[in-house]
Amino acid sequence: MKVPVSDFLASQKPEIKRLVGLLENQFAYVSVLGTDVSGKSFTVRDKSSSVSNIPLEERGFVARVYTNGMYYEYSFNNLPPGGADKLAETIVENAKKSAEMAADIIRYPLIEEESATISYHGEVAILPNSMASAEKLARLRAINEKAHNLCDVLVDLIVTCTTAAVSKVFISSKKDLEQNYIISEAAIVAVVRRDDNTRYFYTSCSGLKGLEILDELESKTAGCVENAVKLLDAKPMQAGEYDVICGPDAVGIIAHEAFGHGVEMDMFVKNRAKAVEYLGKPVASKHVTMHDGAKSASHAASYLFDDEGTLGTDTVIIKDGILQTGISDLLSALKLGETPTGNGRRESFARKAYTRMSNTLIRPGNDKLDDMISSLKHGFLIESAESGMEDPKDWGIQCMFTSAREIIDGKLTGNLYAPVIMTGYVPELLSNITMVSREEDGFELTGAGGCGKGYKEWVKVSCGGPYIKTKARLG
């Protein structure tokens, strides 16, 4: 079913177009982004259930105008009394005051746009509003009960499902863009306990989907509980350097943290990214090709246009181990003399646009997973990721994984180690990659959760890849 347009944005669009026309009499560049994002989050656990609005719910507009070498922005929820005429007067007055006070602000060239009129409607199997809240909670409760029937050491099972209907319009003198799509994510957290030993395992699914995601989540229930129980017998990891094979979930965290934040080009402008020194140089082994972009995959971070009206792209960041380029928002690209990649994203219409990742991934290779495992004398298979962080200035990286499965003489021993922390220097970690699996052996992305710029400015991202073999420091 096609995702419908926002009634709110549709009703406001004619007056927004008139606002753009009025402002063009005063400014060399004018654009307005309109957003309408709504959704619900449903949670069921053993002794409770809840329904809440999604954290990133928003409805409003941001106008951007060019004056005195600067871009001034003005956000608003609705057109005020007096409509576009009154609002245009307010924006002109505030922009001129801002220009007078901004003596040391970075100056930018004028945006040169190409004409585009495009409308995009995503499609899902089951629209979220076609199912009542009580029925959604009942579906989640059934998953909870199914899990308890599988295991007698399960002390809690948390099941969540979140859907977000995203509608955006972008209007300028040359562009009339519209996009409507639905992002859904669902997850299970199984908490188990034996004596004083408590462990948990997390699994999720996500994407440009509707409530059909509930069937996908239910199919993961048994595996989630089984993995949680296995963790009760996990051994502590002994710190050291090991040969490791990382699965798609773990590869996604590595790609996101290793070369995602490090190639955000607003950090180039601020001289806060080491990657700028390595453009055109080797930063990984020849087996590594890495992409980011709204068109790099069809997943939770795919879109027609970003929050500055730039159409989404597929950017090759690393090709055969050589760092090709970074990703950029529009203003950073203007300052650096680069072509924008469509990665200008806002937490909301009332927040600044930054360079942000979208779908970040490592491309599949030609190796068989069985051959990769059999090639290890002693090492680990890491498949489930938890979190990560990096330092774009110095290229340090730290990734946390739920567990690691031991490999000795090319075979899985059945021994499990947990938790697992991977640390290292990004180019060293990526240069150690010697094998990359075929797509048919497992190539996946995950988009549950979000990404912050530092500690704030949250946006939806996805990341993933195939299996890789490398050498890394674990602890």
Image (cartoon, helix red, strand yellow):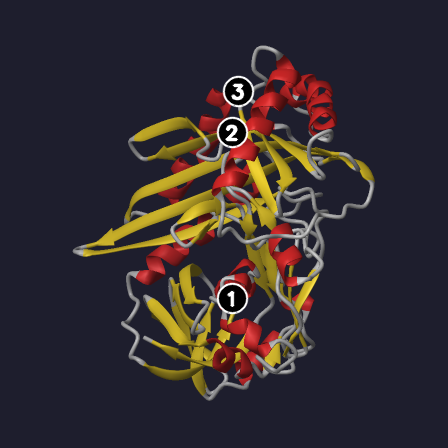
Q: Amino acid at mark 1?
A: Gly
Q: Amino acid at mark 2?
A: Glu
Residue drawn at x 29%, y 47% is 152
108 left or right of 380 in image: right
- Residue 323 in sight here: yes
Do callouts 1 and 3 mark residues in contact (Cβ within 8 Å)?
no
Label 1 crowd (10 A; few <14 / some 14-19 / many >=20) = many
Q: Amino acid at mark 3?
A: Ala
Residue drawn at x 46%, y 89% is 377
Q: Position of residue 334 (x, y in %)?
A: 66, 56
Q: Earlier in the sequence, mark 1 or mark 2?
A: 2
Q: Position of residue 464 (x, y in %)?
A: 57, 61
What residue would you read off at disc 3?
132
Quadrant for the N terminus, please: top right
Q: Secondary structure at mark 1?
A: helix
Q: Quadrant of residue 23?
A: top right
Q: Position of residue 279 (x, y in %)?
A: 62, 76
What residue would you read off at disc 2?
58
Residue drawn at x 61%, y 63% is 361
Q: Nearer the viewer, mark 1 or mark 3?
A: 1
Distance (Cα) linking label 3 and label 2: 22 Å
30 left or right of 270 in image: right
Distance (Cα) linking label 1 and label 3: 43 Å
- Residue 209 in sight here: no
Q: Position of residue 268 (x, y in %)?
A: 54, 65
List the single residue furthest toward the top.
81
Q: Secondary structure at mark 3?
A: loop
Quadrant for the C terminus, please: bottom left
Label 2 crowd (10 A; few <14 / some 14-19 / many >=20) = some
What residue would you read off at disc 1?
262
Residue drawn at x 53%, y 78% is 430
